[in-house]
Image: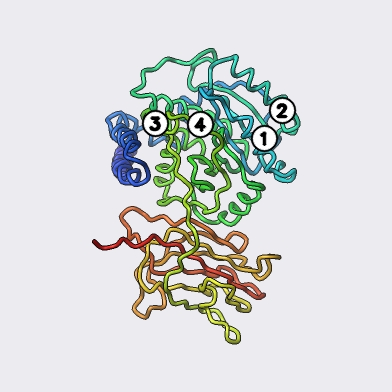
Amino acid sequence: MPSCPRRYIVIFVIFIILGFFFQEEKKNVEHSISERKKIIVQQMVQQQLSSEIKNHLESFKEMQKTSPLLQHTKYKLLAGDPPHGKRLLTLGISSMQHPHGSHLLDTLHSLFRATSEAELECIVVLVHLSDADPEWLLKTADSILKLFASHIRSRSLLVVTGLLGNSSLSGPVKLNYSSTCAELYSRQREGHALLMNFASQLSMYFLLLDDNTQFAPNFVSAIYGTLLAWKEERWVVLEFSSLNSGKVLHASDLSRFTSFSLLFPEDAPTHLLLSKFHHFLGQTVPIRFSISLFHHMGNKSELDDTCFPLEQDKVFGEADNPVATVHTSMYSLWNVIPQYAYILNEEYYSTLDPVEGNHFTVVLNKPHRVTRIAVLTGSADQGLYRLNKGHVLLGSEPLGDSRGCARYTLLGPLVEGKLDQRVFYEEGSGRELNCIQLLVLESQESWLLIKQIKVWVEPEEEEI
């Protein structure tokens, strides 16, 4: 009996959170898409606010458990075998038939060309073929077997297909969808759920990819270095591209996300569900790195462009570095002044033996809406004299003495002495910054070079 009130309290709290959660949905999506695509997303939001969601509250409370649909999944191995033991990263690709042809094989070629032998030992590529057409499944799997036989033999490539619930692999259940986009979203969500469910035990981390992706060289090493730097920080999703894919999750979160996504109505693409998922788990803004590791390959159909609009890579140009004063608690040698690291030239700031708690703070002369920040420490050629462990913080509420701010939030840790990240703002918070601070997290007995701090800002709106 004592557990009953507790149960009602939990359900009530979840109800409140969901209410807030879906109210925020409307605000978050309206600024990033065209008027034509806004209509689609607004329909999705209204659908999410429907009574159907409220009927799933008890299921939502059990979100950490596997969804009943996932408990009865049926998989069929089409090529390869799972690796022995967990690897660092699963690269997950869900692919279906496309009316204008598939780029899946080109995607795999690009992936393996961009990956070294050492990197291959840390990853497993999981391809889920999300289609019930047996002829297409066998033809696609056979092509992968012939072209990537060595990767399949080394257990670095695995191809599967599956269906949710108690359905057999013989064919799909016919459903009535509210729109063509709704059908695509439903198929995408089911394919990703099956992909992530299978991947949950293969590795420590999971990278979601599209089947039309081009890869930057050594992207695995870049992700590995970032994961190392973020290991002690709290995060849910790390974004390595402006694409709807290119997102990394903890493998331990995959079952929770798939169960979460299957509670939603049909009109919700995976990337929007992921943004709500990380917000719900406490990561209130996207964590996106400015240098994209993944790019779109091939031409999109008009339908795909309507249903899955891509955010264009933002062209930043040269840094702006608005007028600011620079202060530091580090020991300055000779005539080297902190301002050198903020001036956009070849000058830099150097210090000896930085200690934990030292800071290097840029105080903007007036608040600005900052969109990107890059911090570079150490020598570019050999990587010497960099800050081994540091945070870049964003400051607001400037102090009266113009030497800093009263409130700081984490933008991110340095990765191998560097940081280059997009800046996003929490809903309801101030959308301008007053301070940017580099904080030393661990003392080091060596020289430290702070080569440059670059800041990009949005142009100020002209008064009419």
The residue that label 4 is drawn on is 192
Single out the mark in the foreground, 3 or 1.
Answer: 1
Distance from the alpha carbon under mark 2 to that under mark 4: 24 Å
Between 46 and 390, the one nearer to me in the picture: 46
Q: Amino acid at mark 1?
A: His
Which one is earlier in the sequence, the residue at label 3 or at label 1?
1
Provide the residue designation for mark 1: 109
Q: Amino acid at mark 2?
A: Leu
Examine the rendering and report whether any part of residue 2 can be seen: no
Residue 9's spot in the image, x, y percent? 30, 42
The foreground one among 189 and 347 is 347
Determine contact: label 2, label 1, CB under 8 Å.
yes
Give the CA distance from mark 3 to mark 2: 38 Å
User: For the residues marked 3 and 1, what is the alpha-carbon distance in whole angstroms?
Assistant: 35 Å
Relative to residue 169, is residue 428 drawn left or right?
left
Quarter in which the N terminus is drawn:
top left
Q: Which residue is mark 3?
A: 263
Q: At which x and y percent is residue 146?
A: 72, 24
- Quadrant that contains the C terminus: bottom left
Picture mark count: 4
Q: Helix, strand, or loop for circle 3? A: loop
- Relative to 237, is 394 above or below? below
Q: Earlier in the sequence, mark 2 or mark 4?
A: 2
Q: Amino acid at mark 3?
A: Leu
Horizontal arrangement in the rendering, residue 298 relative to residue 46 (left or right): right
Between label 3 and label 2, give the one nearer the viewer: 2
> Circles 4 and 3: CB distance less than 8 Å?
no
Q: Position of residue 430 (x, y in %)?
A: 32, 61
